[in-house]
Amino acid sequence: MTPIVRHVKVKSDASPYDGNLIYWSSRMGKHLEATKRVATLLKKQKGKCTHCGMYFRESDVLEIDHITPKRLGGRDEYKNLQILYRHCHDEKTTEDGLVVKYT
Ligand SMILES: [Zn+2]
């Protein structure tokens, strides 16, 4: 019996963000739609967190954020989505006064 692999292991040779969108996407996206979304957003952001401007690295935990929270009328579309570090997302979420996370 083959165990189901839920966590894609971080490869030690995956350096700071190197444009390997498939690699990043496979770490974040559980579904094809999510994977596509992550790849598109990472490309758009050139591998940087839009909150602090730092490049994502292999050990970082990333999350998808609604720039304008859905609660405030934000749409579920690319121009309203961004990828942030988890800690940046937490900060922004606090700033938004919002507890719900989009993952
Ligand atoms: Zn950040």
Image (cartoon, rainbow, N blue to C red):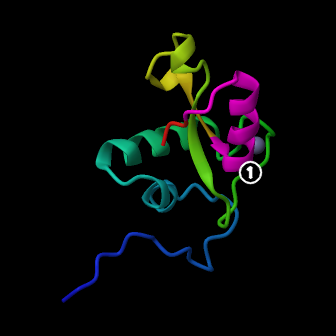
Question: Is-magenta flag for residue 51?
Answer: no
Quadrant assignment for ligand 1: top right
- Residue drawn 58% across and 45% down? 63
Image quarter hosting the N terminus: bottom left
| Range covered by the magenta-colored residues | 84-100
Judged from the image, the secondary structure of the residue bearing numbered disc 1 is loop
The amino acid beneath tag 1 is: Tyr
- Residue drawn 50% across and 75% down? 9
Which residue matches tag 1? 55
Q: In the rendering, at what x and y percent does residue 100 appear?
A: 55, 33
Classify 3 as above or below 101: below
- Residue 90 is drawn in which quadrant? top right
Q: Nearer the viewer, residue 63 or 37?
A: 63
- Residue drawn 50% across and 54% down? 21
- Residue drawn 55% across and 37% down? 101
Q: Is residue 43 left or right of residue 57?
A: left
Classify 45 as above or below 12: above
